[in-house]
């Protein structure tokens, strides 16, 4: 009888033993692993779980902040080439590039020989008010010596920029002065312009160069157009070469100035963003003005929105070389620690329906990053025949002209980069930065005399009478680049362009520098020719044919000797 009772309780005893065994096993598993299983399996956020495990259990002490900072770019890099992470220390600088103004002392400077050189003083700015002058060398900031290897572009801007109303004391070495000069400067709002030049290139036609699409670029464009119209401008060249983009909204507002009501400017769409069309509202100030747009391999993003809208609507001619090919839209998202990401949320499409984003592979894509170098090596900068288009991505403008997606915007008229008169001597002096260094030195030593000339033409006339190029050749020889008379003679016009151009920049600013270069710039000259001959408006194909670009005419080819030639890798001219 008792044995039967024991048998009846056996299953219960076994079950309780199993439960107790599981509980004990779980306890020891948690105890030995720091609750690892509970963290990994108990949350959907695997990344957060991983960081917690590393923080709690990794064999060595880990700086979790640094680990996260290093991981963020890697994570975004797995998405696309343009989703990026911006650390808090860099965000202000990145954002300020597209703002209308910044807090600073009001100078433009470069760093030469580990010293800040003041190229120009912004009129009406804080530095001009206290007597700072172009040519001054800043050697101390806030009573501390600031020269040598510690002087970098980033450090210089951090030292000189700052909130409006704050003070900074700088020590200056001035040419002709024995003692160090000291200036107490109260920082102010310093305007940033994105329209670098706006002038009448001849009696009938104007020229506008836009370096970026910033917050106030549309306002600057309106002002420039108003000035040109007052001078009876009958057509305009819009130069977007080297313009890497900016605010999409700025590009849309600017294109609106040139399109009639109802024409599509651009549309965007993404996985979480339905298609959104941007249409011209008919209030543009130049809807009927002939125009030519200049682009090259560095024209990207907002520049391509502008150029694509003009081309697809047959509003004007595009001249130059194939653009960069960025058709992705980034949304800025900031974190509480002051850092931010630029996350791709949509693609944009030109009015014909093409995406001009060039192909990429998710994650690190060496071919994408090296695309411009690959284009150069494949000969694309020199011949239109080397440009390969995808026939599956053919679209048509309103007039039926074929255009292509999948890799930037093809210009209507292709202008090759010219290598005529480039010699090993020229490459040597440019690669060493000698034309730039000599120009700074020459400007400093002759600033009083050079200041007598207030326009580009008169200053250029003076320089040509002074044997400046011979002085440069002697300077280069003293720096180890031996005189090579035959090569110098072959590259003489290019040496003049670089040396004279830099001196003009130092004395008269960027617009006069641009005026000087434009006189022999084959792309500008081709655009001017189109305006003069009434060919700024595209024409419908006479018959069904696939004309991608138009070759330069014979007369134009002869002028390439002085055009599109390499200039020195410029030392950054920065503002503070």
Image (cartoon, rainbow, N blue to C red):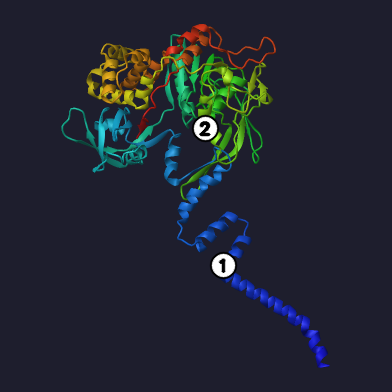
Q: Position of residue 430 (x, y in %)?
A: 36, 24
79 vs 545: above or below: below
- Quick check: can you spot residue 453? no
Task: Tell me the element at label 2.
Answer: loop
Place residue 92 in its image quadrant.
top left
Residue lying at 72% horizontally and 79% vertically, measured from the top left: 16
Q: Residue furthest bottom?
A: 1
Residue lying at 18% horizontally and 27% vertically, measured from the top left: 176
Please tell me how crowded label 1 is: few (under 14), some (14-19), or many (20+) other residues with Cα within 10 Å: few
Please name the residue that numbered disc 2 is placed on.
Answer: 370
Q: Position of residue 303 (x, y in %)?
A: 53, 26
Task: Tell me the element at label 1.
Answer: helix
Residue closest to the eye, 424 or 344: 424
Pointers 2 and 1 in contact (C-beta within 8 Å): no
Q: Quadrant of the C terminus?
A: top left
Please name the residue that numbered disc 1 is placed on.
Answer: 33
- Quick check: can you spot residue 41? yes
Q: How many marks?
A: 2
Q: Position of residue 194 (x, y in %)?
A: 44, 27
Q: Quadrant of the N terminus?
A: bottom right
Is 354 left, or right, of 342 in this rendering?
right
């Amino acid at each position: 009888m008792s044995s039967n009772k024991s048998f009846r309780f056996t299953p219960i005893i076994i079950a309780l033993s199993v439960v107790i065994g599981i509980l004990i096993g779980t306890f020891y598993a948690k105890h030995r692993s720091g609750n690892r299983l509970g963290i990994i399996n108990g949350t959907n956020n695997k990344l957060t779980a991983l960081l917690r495990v590393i923080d709690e259990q990794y064999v060595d002490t880990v700086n979790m902040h640094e680990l996260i900072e290093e991981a963020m770019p890697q994570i975004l890099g797995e998405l696309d080439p343009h989703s990026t992470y911006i650390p808090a220390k860099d965000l202000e600088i990145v954002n300020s590039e597209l703002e209308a103004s910044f807090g600073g002392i009001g100078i433009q400077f470069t760093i030469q020989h580990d010293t800040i050189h003041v190229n120009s003083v912004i009129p009406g700015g804080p530095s001009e008010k206290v007597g700072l002058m172009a040519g001054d060398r800043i050697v101390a900031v806030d009573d501390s010596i600031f020269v040598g290897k510690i002087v970098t572009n980033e450090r210089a801007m951090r030292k000189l920029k700052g909130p409006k109303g704050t003070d900074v004391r700088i020590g200056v070495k001035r040419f002709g002065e024995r003692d160090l000069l000291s200036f107490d400067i109260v920082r102010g709002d310093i305007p940033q312009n994105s329209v670098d030049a706006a002038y009448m290139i001849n009696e009938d036609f104007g020229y506008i160069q836009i370096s970026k699409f910033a917050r106030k670029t549309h306002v600057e464009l309106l002002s420039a157009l108003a000035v040109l119209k007052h001078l009876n401008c009958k057509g305009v060249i819009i130069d977007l070469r080297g313009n890497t983009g900016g605010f999409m909204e700025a590009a849309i507002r600017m294109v609106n100035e040139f399109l009639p009501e109802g024409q599509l400017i651009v549309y965007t769409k993404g996985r979480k963003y339905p298609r959104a069309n941007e249409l011209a509202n008919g209030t543009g100030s130049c809807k009927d003005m002939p125009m030519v747009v200049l682009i090259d391999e560095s024209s990207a993003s907002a520049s391509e929105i502008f150029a694509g809208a003009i081309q697809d609507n047959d509003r004007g001619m595009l001249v130059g070389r194939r653009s960069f090919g960025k058709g992705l839209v980034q949304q800025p998202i900031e974190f509480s620690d002051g850092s931010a990401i630029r996350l791709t949320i949509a693609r944009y499409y030109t009015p014909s329906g093409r995406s001009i984003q060039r192909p990429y592979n998710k994650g690190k894509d060496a071919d994408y990053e090296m695309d411009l170098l690959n284009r150069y090596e494949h000969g694309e900068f020199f011949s239109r025949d080397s440009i390969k288009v995808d026939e599956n991505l053919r679209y048509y403008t309103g007039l039926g002209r074929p255009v292509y997606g999948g890799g930037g915007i093809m210009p209507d008229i292709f202008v090759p980069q010219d290598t005529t008169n480039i010699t090993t001597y020229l490459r040597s002096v440019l690669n060493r930065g000698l034309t730039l260094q000599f120009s700074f030195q020459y400007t400093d030593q002759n600033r009083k005399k050079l200041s007598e000339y207030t326009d580009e033409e008169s200053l250029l006339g003076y320089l040509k009478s002074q044997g400046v190029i011979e002085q440069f050749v002697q300077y280069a020889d003293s720096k180890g680049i031996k005189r090579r008379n035959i090569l110098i003679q072959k590259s003489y016009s290019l040496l003049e362009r670089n040396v004279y151009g830099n001196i003009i920049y130092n004395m008269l600013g960027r617009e006069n520098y641009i005026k000087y270069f434009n006189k022999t710039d084959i792309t500008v000259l081709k655009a001017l020719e189109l305006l003069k001959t009434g060919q700024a408006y595209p024409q419908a194909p006479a018959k069904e044919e696939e004309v991608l670009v138009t070759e330069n005419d014979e007369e134009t080819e002869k002028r390439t000797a002085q055009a599109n030639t390499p200039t020195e890798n410029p030392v950054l001219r920065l503002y503070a």
